[in-house]
Amino acid sequence: MTDDNPMLAVVKQDLGSKAVEVTAPRRKRMTIAATPETYRDVIKYLQDKMDCYHLSVLQGVDNRTSFEVVYHFWSDRNGMFTVKVALPHDKPAIGTITDIVPAAILYEREVHDLFGIEFPGHPDMRRLLLNDEWPKDEHPLRKDWKMDEKKFYGGVRSSTGGEKAG
Amino acid sequence: MEASGLRPEVRKLAEMTIPIGPQHPALKEPVGFMVNVEGERIKSLDLDVSYNHRGIEKGVEQRDFNQSLYLIERICGICSHAHATNFAKGIEELMNLEIPKRASYIRLIVGELERIHSHYLWVGVAGHEIGFDTLFMYTWRDRELVQDLLEIISGNRVNYAINCLGGVRRDLNEKTIKLALDHLKKLGERAAYYTQLATTEETMVDRLSGVGKLPYEKAKSLGSVGPTARGSGVDSDVRRDDPYLAYAEVPFKVITANNCDVLGRTIVRAGELAQSIEMTKWALENLPPGEIKKAPPRSAPPGEVISRYEAPRGELVHYIKSNNTDKADRFGVRTPTMANWPSVVEGLTGQNIADIPIVVAAIDPCLSCTSRTTFVDIDRHKSWVWNWDELRNYSIRWYKENKGIYWGD
């Protein structure tokens, strides 16, 4: 197998019990499952030891019974590292990483907006993508989200009868 | 006077959030700015990127891969091929499907032609924002050659839709290849001229150097990508560092500049134009024979993939999660413009109002008309609203009166 990621064994050994699971689907790709207690240590390790200077993006995933926040870090030498943190479906929250990774500032706002995941400690947590009239506590990328015909989601208010989504 | 020394109601004025601008459905990404100024200098900047959020990520979850491909093509009007190719290669990786070599070369050719047209477009827009309209006319004339080529190759001027899952939709014939090589020769001569212009034309160098400062360290920590990062000396390019399609085989150089300002970003783009033209020529001359597509399976096994692509504006990231059906369970997009917004804020803080148009244009955002901008002058206790044209005229006038930089008569 020439397509193996040569760093897999090193990362596994260095992280030890901080990582729940480390897998490498192919060269230049590695996935590390971490917990809300250890994810900051894992990210610091990637920054210090693996030259991960670039946060490509962080994204949310709704797995129906739980949420996941997925951080994608890039290193020119070692490729892409994906750090996954599972969060409970009820009141998901994970501390901000903007203090150690300034590039996360807009991405955390996006995930907060679309998934309703809280990032305590974020300096400026406002809506990013949805409009101001979007109902509070509704997060459209959640799998159980359905549009409520009776509610107003922004756009033009219908002049006849009930309010209509624009 | 510092803002803290003001009466509370005036300070409140400085912090006021005003709904800015109507929607511009014709533009991809209208952005609202809230700029706090003290006299001429920008104290802080806030931006609102929420206009025209179209919910494409949700839309993809409800469509099968084939339908999604053409929906994703419409994320961006200028780098449509970047999005479609990035999604297609992500899904193909999940399906364990290797596309024919000829198909990956054709995808590369269209991708590089797209970069050429996008960079020509940018050089023109940058020229326009600083009042150098002759440059705008020149580059947009040259860009027509690329647009014609893209139309001959794919059948469309925008949203080429050359991709299908498993390969490409159309083949290239000898006649097209000959015509393309002919056009590329002309484009190469023009690109050399623009590179010379960007590095030696005195007025342009004066106008662009030192504007929109983005130091190397900041470019790295703020996550800048593409020409914005490379103009600040960050040596990264997905095509070289994480090769996809046939990029591992095509020879090219990654262009960087250490100016860390708008001039650096201009030099990088002009240099990339020449590189892309050479790459396209090489790919056309070494196009392997054979099939152009393979039949893909209907569904993808459970898994996830992070697919990266060097779009004209920088690193484009798609995160795709499949669940053994013909639909994606999660499709996440991070466009290069999104990654570059923090660097605009950094580049504008402490600069002149007159530099807003060119600094914003320097990341090449997918917008040519940034709705409207609200100005709050802390000293004069007043605020006013300008649209993009008024701001541009002000910028040209300011540089004419204060720096003697002007391209008119």
Image: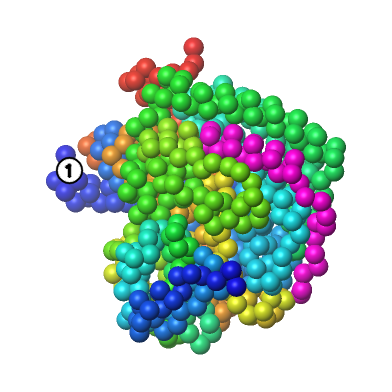
Q: Relative to residue A149, is residue B164 drawn left or right?
A: right
- Please give the count of numbered marks on the rendered protein: 1
**B29, A161: nearer the viewer:** B29
Which secondary structure lies at badge 1?
A: loop
Q: Callout 1, which amino acid? A: Glu
Q: Is residue A86 above or below residue A134?
A: below
Residue B216, given in percent of the width and then of the height, sits at 34, 45
Q: Which residues are magenta?
A: B269-298
Residue A56, given in percent of the width and then of the height, sits at 46, 60
**B81, B353: nearer the viewer:** B81
Say whether residue B235 is magenta. no
Q: Name the quadrant containing residue A38.
A: bottom left
Determine the chain carrying the residue at label 1.
Answer: B
Q: What residue is rendered at 61% in x and 52% in y?
A: B248
**A135, B298: nearer the viewer:** B298
* Residue A141 seen in the figure: no
Q: Residue furthest front?
A: A1
Q: Is residue B157 above or below residue A87?
A: above
